[in-house]
Image (tube, rainbow, N blue to C red):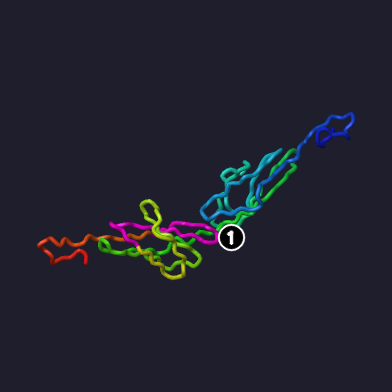
Amino acid sequence: TSDTADPDPTCTGCTDVNTPAPFANVGANSATICEGESYTASATAKNGTIKWTTSGSGSFSNDVVEDAIYIPSAADISNGSVILTMTVTGVSATTNSDTINLTINPIPDKTLTVLGNTICVSQTGTVTLKNSVSGITYQLRNNNDDSLIGSSILGTGGDLVFNVSPSSTTTYNILAKNTTSNCSVELDNTATVTVNDLPDTTSAISDVLLCS
């Protein structure tokens, strides 16, 4: 009996048995995701059964398929990277493995305070972001549909002020983006700019002004 590739020219008067070796290839040697995202492998396995493992403490949605999905744990995110290994086991327990280094970039701080103010119709309002972070850009958006309001502002470490001119009371959110990793997140807090009507100058009663 021969276990070399078929046909085997060295085998004379015997039964030739072809036993292909297990094969594992995870594709690229490295990949990068952002905090809060999962990683989907794009691997190739042949001639055996698959088993994925991690150097971290995250989990796979299914660890016996080629394109396994890995969900990083909080510890993985804190460490910043993990090594994922796909092992293919063939007959007679022969194995072949390949690994990928998965980098997990943190998202910007999403707990920053955001404040609005109260204005009269036709006045300019402000949305103030407290304690911005250097290296992070902040984009003001209409909270109703996430449409962009003006241009993004680069964090300075101090407060940032966005000028707005709503025609009616409007709530805003802010998208924070790391300029190096491109990881982004919407801040938890929103800000409302309240727009009050001008007083009715035709009214006979003018002692109380709603807006001045």
In the rendered image, the vertical position of residue 6 relative to residue 111, given as above or below: above
**Which residue sits at x=70%, y=47%?**
97
Residue 55 appears in the figure: no
Horizontal side of 89 relative to 204 (left or right) equals right
Horizontal side of 137 relative to 173 (left or right) equals right
**Which residue sits at x=13%, y=65%?**
206
Residue 194: horizontal and vertical position, in percent? 28, 60
- The residue at the far left in this view is 204
- Extent of the magenta region: 164-189
State the quadrant of the C terminus: bottom left
In the rendered image, the vertical position of residue 197 relative to residue 7, given as above or below: below
**Which residue sits at x=58%, y=60%?**
79
**Of residues 33 and 65, which is closer to you in this image?**
33
Residue 204: horizontal and vertical position, in percent? 9, 62
Q: Quadrant of residue 6?
A: top right
| Number of numbered markers | 1
**Of residues 100 and 134, which is closer to you in this image?**
134
**Which residue sits at x=12%, y=61%?**
203
Q: Residues within 10 Å of mark 1 (few under 14, many from 20)?
A: few
Horizontal side of 82 relative to 134 (left or right) equals right
Q: Amino acid at mark 1?
A: Asn
In the rendered image, the vertical position of residue 90 relative to residue 191, given as above or below: above
State the quadrant of the N terminus: top right
- The residue at the far bottom in this view is 158
Residue 155 appears in the figure: yes
Residue 141: horizontal and vertical position, in percent? 39, 57
Residue 96: horizontal and vertical position, in percent? 72, 45
- Residue 150 belongs to magenta span: no
SS at circle 1? helix
**Residue under circle 1?**
79
